[in-house]
Image: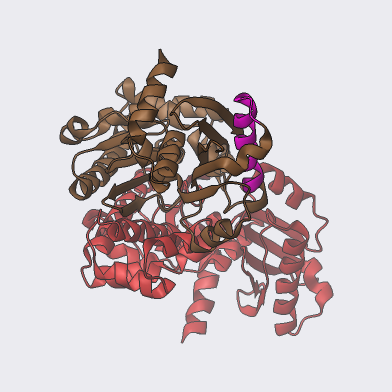
Chain colours: A brown, B red
Amino acid sequence: MQEHYFIGVDGGGTKCKAVLQNHSGQIIGEGLSGSANPATDLPLAIKSIVESCEIALTQAGLPLNHLQFCHVGMGLAGVNLPSINRKMREWQNPFASVHLTTDLHIACLGAHDGHDGAVIITGTGSSAFAVVEGNQLNLGGHGFTAGDKCGGAWMGLAATKVCLEALDGLADYSPLVDSLKQHLKCTNATAIAEIVNGAPAVFFATLAPLVIRAAEQNDVNAVAILQNGGEYISKLAKRLLAHSGERLSMIGGLAPLITPWLDNEVQQRLVQPIHSPEFGALLLAQQQTGVTNSSLLIKKTTIKEAS
Amino acid sequence: MQEHYFIGVDGGGTKCKAVLQNHSGQIIGEGLSGSANPATDLPLAIKSIVESCEIALTQAGLPLNHLQFCHVGMGLAGVNLPSINRKMREWQNPFASVHLTTDLHIACLGAHDGHDGAVIITGTGSSAFAVVEGNQLNLGGHGFTAGDKCGGAWMGLAATKVCLEALDGLADYSPLVDSLKQHLKCTNATAIAEIVNGAPAVFFATLAPLVIRAAEQNDVNAVAILQNGGEYISKLAKRLLAHSGERLSMIGGLAPLITPWLDNEVQQRLVQPIHSPEFGALLLAQQQTGVTNSSLLIKKTTIKEAS
């Protein structure tokens, strides 16, 4: 009888990660490919997903036609939109089975080893997710500039605003103002306004490290920005904890930098995420195909990988 | 000897207004044409300026070749940018003389009958200007979304943010939230986020009346938005008063609606604007060509016009 495999896929706007596991629980291959956000570009997303899985198979020394023996858990940005979700499900895929969910869901499954729990994700944007007994809760993540508070883009825009106000003599002039002027190679407010107007989220996110560094030096404006952002994340955290009980993790590039700005009560409730999102996708594939003790299988191999 | 005329031109992104005055101080014609922002479209701006002046001449029963006897004061959006200013000055114009400045400057000249003073302008955006003994001070107006605080677009975006937070259970649910959902024909946060992400300033400015109306009913979220915006405008006002002394006027579509939210101290210092911006441009033309008692001449005619 042909052996079956599990693949976990984590697809986002910039890259797609796949992790391949054999039936005895060993991680035997990994693949990394390009953009896989089906809301932005569906054919490209499909191409990237298949490519990352093929790379993982090749790394494991398996032929590409073995995709047909793979049960795939897949977490993708954009599939919260009903139209995109339907299109992905209509895809005549090459796998044994596909179990589709959002990138937030697999991040949460990974962080809590497949168990109930919640996550707050802060990178360029910010969003939050919890799952309890199959019930999902999505909060935040409404996009730049109306939502995504305390993400990197929000932080950079907040710094730009206070810098412009300080140059107009309407806010305290602090070292953050100088560091922003220097970073943007501008000497006055008009020059800064010309650069920043209409700039995308990724541009503002590149300014976030200036805010973090300034706040570490007790810069009055940077501290105010992170206190304000931290308040929002603390409110998110309390809502999630009320919904999901015990386990809450902060993940994403800004997570360790924002954590010190959260309420003490919230900080004390945070737990370290156990696995990364692609392993959450793997757990989803195992759960959906009825494999038991799946979390143990992954734990064993990731511990082995790390040693 | 050929009689000379004065024209005041107020040119902005949506329209261009001209007002024509004869040498004895009477307003004898007015013209209205299309977009005249040279930073957006220089040839169109020039076309609109000439057209508005020709309409004013025709209304006065004068031939179009009389443009050559007209001294023109001109306040245009965008000429604060050095490159745009140079291009406008290079224009081989059909007038006796052209005296070019910004739209803010003529608004200030008009509001204070050609004398020193300051203005705060709140419409879709917000900005501030003062002139004292020839020295100009520009504050604010750095564009949506990094600047222009307390303009209509800022107000609409602030309402959208609090609405999304309220729908996530992170802010108070107030009648403003319902009015915004109804206005956008949305029942949930995801639908609102899809509409507002990437929307331009003019879109958000259409939401400002919802905030104003809700605040009049003591809506907790709307009141917080207008208090926050009002604080910013009050700070602007104090900076301007420190620079320009006595006269400060609020102008623009939102001015009467925002005034109640300013510091009492600031409200008591506000004076009504005397003329509209195109008359400020007329005063500029008179000042620059050495005509004295110009303000009296305008006052007489506008009083006559109004009766």
The residue depicted at 52 percent of the width and 66 percent of the height is B295
Looking at the rendered structure, the number of numbered marks drawn on it comes to 0
Whether B127 is drawn above or below A191: the answer is below
Q: Which residue lies furthest to the bottom in this view?
A: B307
Q: Percent from the top left, x then y, of residue A252? A: 41, 33
Q: Give the range drawn in magenta.
A: A45-62
Judge from the rendering whether residue A190 lies leftward or rightward of residue A213; answer left or right: right
Q: Percent from the top left, x then y, of residue B90? A: 79, 49
Image quarter hosting the N terminus of chain B: bottom right
Asked which quadrant contains residue B50, the reply is: bottom right
Q: Residue furthest top?
A: A307
Q: Does the segment drawn in magenta span residue A54?
A: yes
Whether B247 is drawn above or below B252: the answer is above
Q: Percent from the top left, x then y, of residue A153? A: 46, 40
Which one is nearer the viewer's eye here, A197 or A227? A227
Whether B63 is drawn above or below B11: the answer is below
Which one is nearer the viewer's eye here, B201 or A295? A295
Q: Is residue A213 visible?
A: no
Q: Percent from the top left, x then y, of residue B198? A: 53, 56
The residue depicted at 54 percent of the width and 34 percent of the height is A17
Asked which quadrant contains residue B188, the reply is: bottom left
Q: Main secondary structure of the magenta part?
A: helix
Q: Can residue A29 be seen in this view?
A: yes
Whether A247 is drawn above or below B296: the answer is above
Judge from the rendering whether residue A172 lies leftward or rightward of residue B275; answer left or right: left
Q: Does the segment drawn in magenta span residue A157?
A: no
The residue depicted at 40 percent of the width and 51 percent of the height is A147
Q: Residue furthest left?
A: A265
Asked which quadrant contains residue B286, the reply is: bottom right
